Image (cartoon, rainbow, N blue to C red):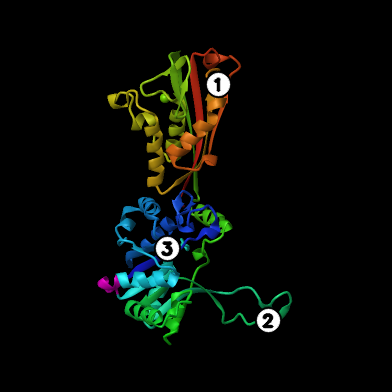
Amino acid sequence: MSAIALVVAAGQGLRAGGGTPKQYRPVLGKAVLSHCLQHLGSHASIDHIQLVIGEGYDDLYAKTVSELDPAIERKLLQPIQGGATRQTSVYNGLKALEVMAPKYVFIHDAARPFVQARVIDDLFAALSTHEGAIAALPVPDSLKRGRNLVEEDVDRSQLWRAQTPQAFVFSTIKNAHEMAYDAHQSAFTDDASVLKAQGLDVALVRGDEAMFKVTEPEDFKRAEAFLMNQFNDIRMGQGYDVHRIVPGDHMWLCGVKIDTDISLAGHSDADAGLHALTDAILGAIGAGDIGQHFPPSDPQWKGAASDAFLAHAAKLVREKNGLIANCDVTLICERPKVGPHRLAMQKRIAEILQIQEDRVSVKATTTEKLGFTGRGEGLAAQAIATVRLPG
Ligand code: MG
């Protein structure tokens, strides 16, 4: 069996705060919509994905697409524009799919990022006997009706919380939406209601708590925790680097240019901070060391900005579907004074690694004028990094 997924992402969704519609707000560095497309599109029976997006969000949409695996991106059809209500947006989407005449359509809200493959399987199974089927969960709590006082108990045994995806025979749900549109019925909050209004049966399939809706600010924390739980293979790596101090007029340290009367000598830009951190990340994923990836004997790295080394290590982590949980760099020198540049360094490292700034720390210390760092002959840097891989 196969189907086209119709993902409604046209809402303003400003209740979650932050000024950007919630489907474009990040959870662990990727947009909610990106997580949604990734989960939905990973199912082998979802052939294509038709997105309905709001007007004026082309840039955010493009950024979201850039976060997807190429295999998922290939499933995306040209997005179409939504309407004033969810119902209109879905109707627009169904009309756009008419030319493809799919047998089944799975209608899904972008705000539910973690679609579970088991639920998609069960929805397909239900479609063999019904025109429509929805994911839904029973209500575990006792239910009461009333305003300030309990007026009556409500029997919860036949109550369900509707989720999405909601799956339908394409022609049936398209006709149902058409009839609702023609009859000016515009108050339906989901597609099961649109079908039911035509007197057709909708099957209930057990949903999954993981398919919760991201609406309020605390839902973003829940989404982050949910994702973090998938990254249980926790790795640590450490790195250490030293460069000689020579007379000069500037030095690069942790990706920041510092104007001073000393420099660091080295084949590249000699940024010992970024070198130590690159080694820490490579160490965490067992990927050798910086010299192996960027041999000093290779002339192309002469004078190179060390940003590229660190960005490469971060890319290797992403290719393993991992994330960098935090990193901590200690610079050991008498000069230059690191304090005034510390925040800029943390910001620059966060940019290169594409992680939040509060996951990056840069500190400095001296060695009380002892040893080569104390005598100002060289600058040392050490770093540790925590990487989380799926496991
Ligand atoms: Mg070095």
Q: Which residue occupies the extreme bottom position in the image?
A: 199
Image region (quadrant) for ligand 1: top left
What type is the residue that disc 2 sits on? Asp
- Place of residue 273 in the rendered image (x, y in percent of width and height, measured from the top left): 47, 28
Q: Label 2's element?
A: strand
- Taking the image as drawn, is residue 390 in sight? no
Magenta stretch: give its range. 97-102
Image check: 384 left or right of 128?
right
Residue 100, magenta (yes or no) = yes
Q: Which residue occupies the extreme left position in the image?
A: 99
Residue 366, magenta (yes or no) = no
- Place of residue 372 in the rendered image (x, y in percent of width and height, measured from the top left): 52, 14
What residue would you read off at disc 2? 153
What type is the residue that disc 3 sits on? Ala
Image check: 128 left or right of 372?
left
Image check: 255 left or right of 72?
right
In whole angstroms, how far apart are the C-alphas of marks 1 and 3? 50 Å
What residue would you read off at disc 1? 337
Position of 108 relative to 353 (above/below): below
What type is the residue that disc 1 sits on? Lys
In whole angstroms, how far apart are the C-alphas of marks 2 and 3? 38 Å
Most foreground residue, 358 or 298: 358
What residue would you read off at disc 3? 10
The rendered magenta stretch, by its main secondary structure, is classed as helix
Marked residue nearer the N-terminal end (2 or 3) = 3
Position of 120 relative to 23 (above/below): below
